[in-house]
Image (spheres, rainbow, N blue to C red):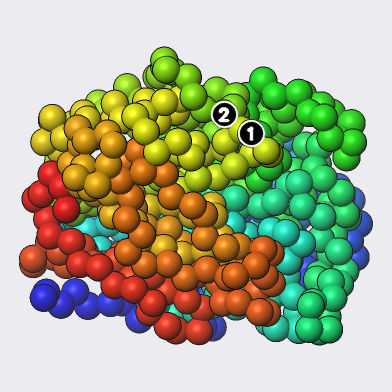
Amino acid sequence: MSYRPRFPSPDRRTVLRGSLAASAALALPVAGAAAPAFALSGRPRAGWGVQVGDVTTSSALVWVRADRPARMIVETSATESFRRARTWYGPLVGPGTDFTGTTPLYGLPAGEQVHYRVTLADPDDPRRTGEPVYGTFRTAPARRRDGVRFLWSGDIAGQGWGINPDIGGYRVYDEMRRLDPDFFLCSGDNIYADGVIEPSVTLPDGRVWRNITTEEKTKVAETLAEYRGNFRYNLLDDNLKRFNAQVPSIIQWDDHEVRNNWYPGQILDDARYTEKNVNVLAARSMQAFREYFPVSTLHESSGDGRVHRVVHHGPLLDVFVLDMRSFRNANSPGRQPDDTTGILGAAQLDWLKRELSRSHAVWKVIAADMPLGLVVTDGATNFEAVAQGDPGAPLGRELQIAELLRFIKHRRITGTVWLTADVHYTSAQHYAPEAAVFKDFAPFWEFVSGPLAAGGFPANALDNTFGPDRVFVRAPDRANVSPMESPQFFGEVDIDGDSGELTVRLRAEGGSVLFTKVLQPGRVGQ
């Protein structure tokens, strides 16, 4: 096994020097979190921390939010002293983007630690600047032997379990930060826009769970301001802000960014909503999503407005980020004998096949926001994911996945691994044609993790169309188990630079490694 030196975590004083003041946001009145005022005295503040997204060998996106109109200025350096710093002049942030801004960085050195600081300047007097907010990240390696290590999970602030100050907030983010990964893949449900956060919840054993609350979390999100407030809610947690300052992310979305089990064209029959048209709600959520995450394809200067994309992380890894929400057909019993729309839409499926065939990376991680062979229901008769409980030949959305799996086999595309979250437990499924009804595909693995800060649920049933074998599972035995009663879950992927082996570890909050699987490179099937 090759040894790739891990850069030590940045000095606590450095990363938090400008951002610890952000913890004061926890003490702000709820009304103060809704929108910055224009007549604020003093200097611009970045009380919501910093984020970096979609890091490659030479580029990255830096995010910040101001408390008033301000010019975003980013400085980067190879050292914490910021000697020979390079300056990047970002956008003027204002109410049109909820005072958020993203600055692209280009021409960065490959495989190196980059230190950065974000300063906000008064647009009327550039000499009036706020306290800088500091962060750091590693660019992707240009050399294979350097290896790659990342984490993934999803599902944050769901089922009424929000930021609980009694247990230290989102503690799992501090645990993940201390592992010092190259990046974090969030597999969707970054927020629960349809989930109310009550001040307290009594647990079955009589203990009381207490939540930090905000005005936007007292009802389901419908307006743009309410969606923005949902994304802002998680940034009240200090653990998450420290994590964001050290670990870059690759972000995708799923249903709860809008509402549970939504699909395009849906008209709601839900008394909680005055706006019944899901397309309207989804457009508002997408605007807030674009504002609150640094996503390359959503950036105004270079993006094309889509979530699905490929993030190239050096010669060892390409991450294919799917959008299984925006282009799907309506949830149904899923028994159609002909279905070209499926869960990806025809254009996204063509894109995925094309990009997979072009990839020269040793490993091709397919980041899916929903699992393939796990039966996820939507009401009594409809289904939410791919599988629909019929263990026979592919029907409905399964037809599109069958087409993709057949393509991977016949094009002899090596090193595909599926990662997902969504179901609020952790498991490993091996898909093999000899155990399946549909047999024209090469074997592959699907790994599930999550939630990060939400309720835990029992394991879903399997659908035998693609022959999944549940090799490992850890799940609660009842629905909506709180984070005080069951650990939260995340996964770790470690790609060795010398051998090319990919090791998956399914982890539980508290330091436990529950399951480990080592995969060999250069194979069409595993």
Q: Is residue 447 above or below residue 382?
A: below
Q: What number is the disc on residue 79?
A: none
- Give residue 363's position: percent from left, percent from top: 20, 51
Query: Element under label 1?
Result: loop
Neighbourhood count class around disc 2 (C-alpha, 10 Å): few under 14, some 14–19, many 20 upward: some
Residue 326 x, y percent position in the rendering = 55, 29
The structure residue drawn at horizontal position 85% and vertical position 76%, both measured from the top left corner, is 202
Image x and y of residue 270, in percent: 84, 35
| Label 1 – label 2 distance at C-alpha | 6 Å
Is residue 241 visible in the rendered image? The answer is no
State if disc 2 and disc 1 touch (CB < 8 Å).
Answer: yes
What residue sits 22% from the left and 58% below the top?
Answer: 141
Label disc, if present, on residue 333 of the rendered structure: 2
- Residue indicated by mark 1: 381
Residue 42 position in % (x across, y down):
81, 62
Quadrant containing the N terminus is bottom left
Instruction: Give the secondary structure at mark 2.
Output: loop
